[in-house]
Structure formats: structure tokens, C-alpha cells
Amino acid sequence: MSKLQPVRGTADLLPDVMAQHRLVIDTARRTTARYGFQEMATPIFEFSEVFSRPLGESSDIVTKENYSFADRGGEMLTLRPENTAGVVRAMISGGLTQSLPLKYFYAGPMFRYERPQKGRMRQFHQIGIEYLGPTDALADAEVISAGARLLAELGVLDQCVLHLNSLGDAASRAAYRAALVAFLQADESRLSDDSKRRLAMNPLRILDSKDPGDRDILQSAPQLQDYLNAESKAHFSALTTALDTAGVAWMFDPLLVRGLDYYCHTAFEFVTDALGTQGTVLGGGRYDGLAEMLGGPAVAGVGWAAGIERLAMLAGAKTPTAPTAPKVAVLSTDADADIAAFRLAEMLRDAGIDIDFPTTGSIGKKLKKAARAEIKLAIILGGDELVKNNVQLRNLADGTQSEVMMDDLADVVAAALLAP
Ligand code: ATP
Ligand code: MG
């Protein structure tokens, strides 16, 4: 480490960016609350098993992307790469399976050891919802509608396309998996190295390959929807009917899979072409097998997660996110008045007014900096004012100045801030 830098793939969220993140999080909390989702949070690390058990040793996240370490007590821990497993773990360990359905919203950092690029970080941030309990397709429809509504509220829905697929139930997927493996084995030597590895461990994920050679082979691969049984077909058609009724536009995408074994039935992603190759902003699906894989009772679930960085980039251009700096400054002209000025600043804050209180430099420098910081009102206080129990109130926008008695100050300032 020659220079002090953030770790590769991590970033500081300075106020401009933080304000965009805040907007995304606040909008998501408000929008999902309209569907009854309530905010909760799980720890950012869990026993490694929480992720390795359900994700399967073969999943990309576990094989390549996890931050795992032994703590000082020798426990194997993993920084959460996603929050669904943590939320389901919380449901099981909190004994909450007695009070289904549960509807949770979360926001927070996730960690994946990936190759950093624009929109792909090693510490990134997600918002998400999990709907635990219901097995019916209307729950999927609600979850997807909440995602669409969030994108609409952020003003980016028109830049996104909803891709939708059905993975079917476990029986349908097993039948398809066998057919896909048989098909791909015939061409195994032409597959990319990643796909060769997945063929044995996680063949459905090959459908998702970005490798041109793989894509070519996949053109004539067997189609998942030809292997769906009647129950799986009914689930999908109930979902699409509900989405159509609600006016949520969608596109059938037979190659859309979620990599993990516990997903079933519904898989979906909102994709944009406005962010280059990192085009998936919000993705999710149904995960009825997850709770059991974690060692709990069978509890169905459906949810999504969205990348805050990607949403902020998409929405950023549209949303002026002026961080709100104070418009009023209290400036002391000499050291003898500093304490009184500090007390005055506190008194005005008590009255609900945001106050900047610079503590260094001459009064000339303080005034210059205040002007640069677009301060509207400067409250100037020195020895004379202390004696007379008043202040000089200078309007930095028009240069006018007046004396205001200390007792009237909060009201005068509040009124002046309201004036155009
Ligand atoms: P991708 O195909 O882009 O790798 P994914 O399938 O791994 O995405 P999910 O696990 O479904 O993504 O996570 C949901 C969302 O979180 C993604 O749609 C994306 O917006 C965001 N996301 C995932 N990984 C990252 C990352 N490394 N950096 C920034 N955002 C990410
Ligand atoms: Mg990924």
C-alpha cells in the first residue's frame, strides 16, 4: 500500500452520491410500505453455512465471490453477498414461522469478490423485499408490481424492460436439467471453460452465459418451458394475467435463470440498456426451497433485490439531489464574542434553523466563504453587539444589512428565509 486508498472495488459515498443513495432508499422504503413491507436488517456477516448450504458449493457466488474468514474464535464467517438467505435465517432463528405471512424491506451493503467495473463493485448496496409464506402467483405479482412501482417513482421505469421466465417446480426443473445436460454434453468441447465447469455442477446457469460460443450452441438447446408440468404452467399464467391486469409490461425471456438451486417458478429482471453491460437493475424470483435448505420448516418465499449504485446512476441525471447545506451562518468578528456566537448558533438550531458556524479565519474570510457556500443570511456578532444585545443581519444575496435585537432574531431569520 503505497498511497492510502480505498480497497479495490469499494468507494466512499461522499455527500452528492450519498444523497442519491438516500433518495433511492427512501423512495424504496415508502413505495414498498404501500404494499405492507416493513423495514428490517440482518447482520452484515453470518456463519458461512448460511450462504454455502443453500447456495450450494457450486454456485458462482460461493466458488468465486465470497468474502469468508475465520474470526478470532475460529468461527467461519462470510460477509453477506446478498440478503435473502439472511432474512430467511432470521425468520427461522427468530421463530417467526408462526406468524406468516411476513413482508420485509431491507437496505444495506453486500460484498462480492468480483472484477470491479462501472456498476460492479466489491462492496455495493442493495435494497430488496422478501415476501415469506404465500405460494400463490398473486404474491409474485405483488412483488413484481412493487418493483415496477419503485422504478416508476424513481422516473426510470421507461428505461427498463421487465424480463420474465418460469423455472417451473422442482420436478419440471429436474426433467429439464437432464435434457439440457444431455444436449450440452454432445458439444462439451466447444463450451467455454466456465460453462464446462457449470455443466457438472450448475448446468442451468449456462443459459445465462455471455460467451458468444456458448450463446451459439444454446440457440438450439431444449427449452425450459417445454418441460413445465401443468401446475407450473398454471402458476406462470396466473402471474402473467395478474401483471397484465395491473398494466405491468413484461417480456418473456426463456434464457433468464437465477443461478441458484432453490429458485423455482418465477424469475424476473428489470434490465436497462442505459448503463452499458451492467444492465440488470432489479432482479428476483421465487425461492420456495430455501427455508428447508437452511434447516427450517418449508416456507415459501418470493422477493427481489436491486443495486442502489445502478439505480442511482440511472435516476441520477433526473433527480437534482442538492444536499441541503445551511443557508444561515453565525459569524463572530472577534475572539471575545466566540462563545456568545456559539451559544447563539445553538439557540437558532433549537428554533429549527440550520446554522453554519465557521470557527476559524477573520470576519472578511468568513464572509467570503459564506458567499461561496451560497449562505443567504450572515448573522454577525462582535463586542459592540454583545454590549447592545443585538446582531448585524446581512443579506448576502442583496447586500442589505440591519440591526436585529437578540430576542427577535429567530423570528426575523425564519421570516427572511421564507422570503423569495
Ligand atoms: P449480475 O448479472 O449483474 O452479476 P446478479 O445476478 O449477480 O447480477 P443479483 O444477485 O440478482 O445480481 O443482485 C441483484 C442486483 O444487485 C443486481 O441486479 C444489480 O443491480 C445489483 N448488483 C449485483 N452485484 C453487484 C455488484 N457487484 N456491484 C453493484 N451492483 C450489483
Ligand atoms: Mg453477479
Image (spheres, rainbow, N blue to C red):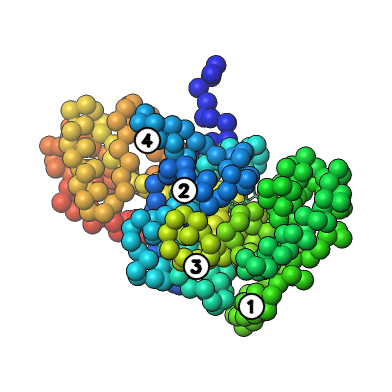
Q: Is residue 339 left or right of residue 227?
A: left
In this view, the residue in front, 93 or 308, is 93
Look at label 3 and name its amino acid. Ala
Viewer-nearest of discs 4 and 2: 2
Label 3 to label 4, Cα distance in Å?
Answer: 62 Å
Mark 4–mark 2 CB contact (< 8 Å): no
| Residue 128 image position (x, y, % from top left) | 50, 58
Label 4 to label 2, Cα distance in Å?
Answer: 57 Å
Using a 10 Å C-alpha cutoff, classify the residue at mark 1 as few (fewer than 14 neighbours), some (14 to 19) or many (20 or more). few
Using a 10 Å C-alpha cutoff, classify the residue at mark 3 as few (fewer than 14 neighbours), some (14 to 19) or many (20 or more). some
Residue, disc 4 = 367
Label 1 to label 2, Cα distance in Å?
Answer: 30 Å
Residue, disc 1 = 231
SS class, disc 4: helix
Viewer-nearest of discs 3 and 4: 3
Q: Is residue 135 left or right of residue 225?
A: left
| Residue 350 image position (x, y, % from top left) | 21, 51
Q: Is residue 52 above or below residue 266?
A: above
Query: Residue 300, which numbered label?
Result: 3
Mark 1: is the Cβ under 8 angstroms from ligand 1? no
